């Protein structure tokens, strides 16, 4: 699933499905968002803002509900408008894979696999079909089969969110990725907080491994879970971080025993800003 940065559009506009000239990725995401809302039973607790999500299927209206308020999603903060579609779609797809997938059983026969490949090749090679029609046909074809894993590609998970909400967002994304061994989570980010919270998730995994052999450390596991949910820890062997500098160069981020290095482009820019502030203080004193 590709989760575009402009996902808050589906929260803020009434009947976005009726609009034309939108990116194909946004239409696909919108379809999954609608499916996720229809599949919802009751209110859904959100891991940010101490709030819940509520959807009226009769009126087709989404709400954000708190202890003393209830407002339409379209009238809520930009953070909720960005987060709710991401959370609902990710949860919906991860749950559907988790319920249906049995890794020990091949989902389709060899003959079915050959037939599917022929259908795909026929669609892609047809010169009479526009790209929009090809994409729609491929989506219809894929909907007839069960997926074996969930690959979640998320742009800017931190979009419009406070640091604490960014942590809740990351923990939920990692939790859903951890639900199946074949699942993958791919993110792009401009947030130093996301990188730091990834570091916490890796460290929590290392601590949890040390606790596993002991059956008499329940209290320690409880404390660990309060710091970082055990469902949201990350095996350092499963984590790779690449950084893009302001010159367009891409390199793999270094790590220390699996812990992502804090010597990265995002943190360096924070240090640079602090140094500039020190220089300003020095200049002020010299006046």
Image (spheres, rainbow, N blue to C red):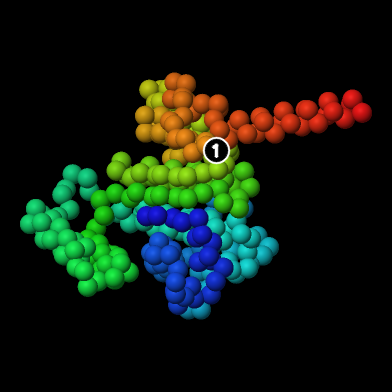
Instruction: Give the quarter of the image for residue 263.
Output: top right
Viewer-closest of 128 and 72: 128
Q: Quadrant of residue 41?
A: bottom left
Q: Quadrant of the N terminus?
A: bottom left
| 243 left or right of 270 in image | left
Residue 175 left/right relative to 97: right
Residue placed at 58% from the left, 35% from the top?
Answer: 266
In the image, residue 63 above or below residue 282:
below
User: Residue 200: x, y in percent?
Assistant: 52, 32
Relative to residue 275, is residue 19 depicted above or below?
below
Q: Residue furthest right?
A: 287
Please tell me how crowded label 1 is: few (under 14), some (14-19), or many (20+) other residues with Cα within 10 Å: few
Quadrant in the picture for residue 276: top right
Outermost left residue: 111
In the rendered picture of this protein, how many numbered marks are placed on residues? 1
Depth check, front residue: 32 or 102: 32
- Left or right: 244, with 101 as reference point: right
Q: Is residue 230 left or right of residue 64?
A: left
Q: Name above or below for residue 282 compared with residue 71.
A: above
Residue located 21% across and 69% down the image: 127
Which quadrant would the C terminus be assigned to in this image?
top right
Q: Secondary structure at mark 1?
A: loop
Q: Is residue 140 visible?
A: no
The reply to whether residue 189 is visible in this rendering is yes
Q: Position of residue 251 (x, y in %)?
A: 44, 31
Q: Which residue is mark 1?
A: 246
- Residue 142 percent location from the top left of the image: 25, 62
Q: Residue furthest front?
A: 247
Which residue occupies the foreground of this view, 191 or 229? 191
Where is residue 250 shown, x and y percent of the image? 45, 35
Residue drawn at the location 39% of the way across and 58% of the way down = 92
Q: Which residue is found at the position 89% from the left and 26% from the top?
A: 285
């Amino acid at each position: 699933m590709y989760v575009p940065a402009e996902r808050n559009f589906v929260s803020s506009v009434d009947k976005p499905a009726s609009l034309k000239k939108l990116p194909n990725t946004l239409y696909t995401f919108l379809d999954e968002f609608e499916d996720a809302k229809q599949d919802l039973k009751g209110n859904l607790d959100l891991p940010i803002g101490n709030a819940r999500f509520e959807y009226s299927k009769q009126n087709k209206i989404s709400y954000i509900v708190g202890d003393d308020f209830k407002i339409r999603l379209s009238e809520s903060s930009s953070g909720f408008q960005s987060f709710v579609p991401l959370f609902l779609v990710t949860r919906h797809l991860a749950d559907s894979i988790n319920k249906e997938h049995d890794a020990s059983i091949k989902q389709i026969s060899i003959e079915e696999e050959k037939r599917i490949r022929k259908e795909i090749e026929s669609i892609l090679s047809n010169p009479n079909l526009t790209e929009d029609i090809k994409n729609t046909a491929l989506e219809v074809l894929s909907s007839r089969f069960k997926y074996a894993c969930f690959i979640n590609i998320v742009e800017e998970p931190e979009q419009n969110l406070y640091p604490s909400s960014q942590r809740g967002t990351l923990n939920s994304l990692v939790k859903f990725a951890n639900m199946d061994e074949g699942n993958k989570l791919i993110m792009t980010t401009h947030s130093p907080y996301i990188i730091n919270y990834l570091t916490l998730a890796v460290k929590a995994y290392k601590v949890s491994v040390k606790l596993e052999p002991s059956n008499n450390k329940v209290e320690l596991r409880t404390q660990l879970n309060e710091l970082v949910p055990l469902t949201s820890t990350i095996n350092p062997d499963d984590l790779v971080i690449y950084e893009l500098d302001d010159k367009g160069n891409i390199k793999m981020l270094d790590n220390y025993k699996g812990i992502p290095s804090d010597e990265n482009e995002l943190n360096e820019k924070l240090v640079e800003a602090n140094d500039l502030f020190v220089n300003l203080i020095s200049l002020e004193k010299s006046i």
